Image: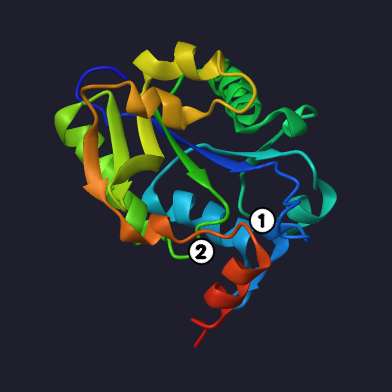
Amino acid sequence: MTGNSEPMIAGLLLAAGGSSRLGRPKQLVEFEGKTLIRRAAEALIGAGCSPVYVVLGAEVERPHQELYGLGVHFVINDSWQVGMGSSIARGMGVIISTKPSPDAVLISLCDHPFVTAESLRPFLTAFRQSRTDLVAASYNDNIGVPALFSARFFGALSALDGKIGAQELIRNSSHALTIPLPEAAIDIDVPEDLLRILSFES
């Protein structure tokens, strides 16, 4: 970022998991006429993130097809079984090599069906107005993802490994700006979660 230009905020969508507890690829679950992975990617794009990167792993071909036409960039994590930290590190490795390098990255998950572009825009606004290093969602007395990290966190994010994800960095930060996001408390891990989510369909 130079002068008074708007900061460049990339989006990083984590969608590499195997969904073993659900018994089917959660990325491809349909809710209100769209798969979760497409809803999540559209949310990042609609919020103003550019470029947007999607980390795939356990499922590649079908999620790739689901995002056709969105202009997102795909990152393949062959070590997705190791944990979410490896997907973040893999994605950040690509983001850091982008020229020009983004000023921040907004990390989100594909299994938050109620997180929309409107949900995510305040994260970008908060960063642009305050230039804070970390903006995290708050829900159920916790803080976590979606979360926006400034470039000062890029090294730490790219060094994550295994099951230690961005949550650890957020918890260890004493300067996080938080945004209430009750929508992020609803995710899909087990079949019961899916049944509950589908009951909200109009």
At 80% from the left edge and 47% from the top edge, which residue is drawn? 59
Q: Name, please, the residue furthest toward the left.
A: 130
Q: Measured along the vertical axis of the image, is residue 10 above or below residue 164? A: below
Q: Which residue is mark 2?
A: 113
Side of 1 relative to 96 (left or right): left
First-in-chain label (1 vs 2): 1
At 46% from the left edge and 56% from the top edge, which residue is drawn? 43
Mark 1–mark 2 Cα distance, whole angstroms, equals 21 Å
- For this rendering, which residue is in front, 86 or 34? 86
Q: Give the percent coordinates (x, y) of residue 201.
A: 52, 83
Amino acid type at circle 1 is Gly
- Picture quarter containing residue 60? top right
Amino acid type at circle 2 is Pro
**Residue 103, visible in the rendered structure:** no
- For this rendering, which residue is in front, 11 or 17? 17
Q: Give the percent coordinates (x, y) of residue 12.
A: 53, 37
Side of 84 relative to 148 (left or right): right
Q: Give the percent coordinates (x, y) of residue 10.
A: 46, 34
Q: Which residue is mark 1?
A: 69
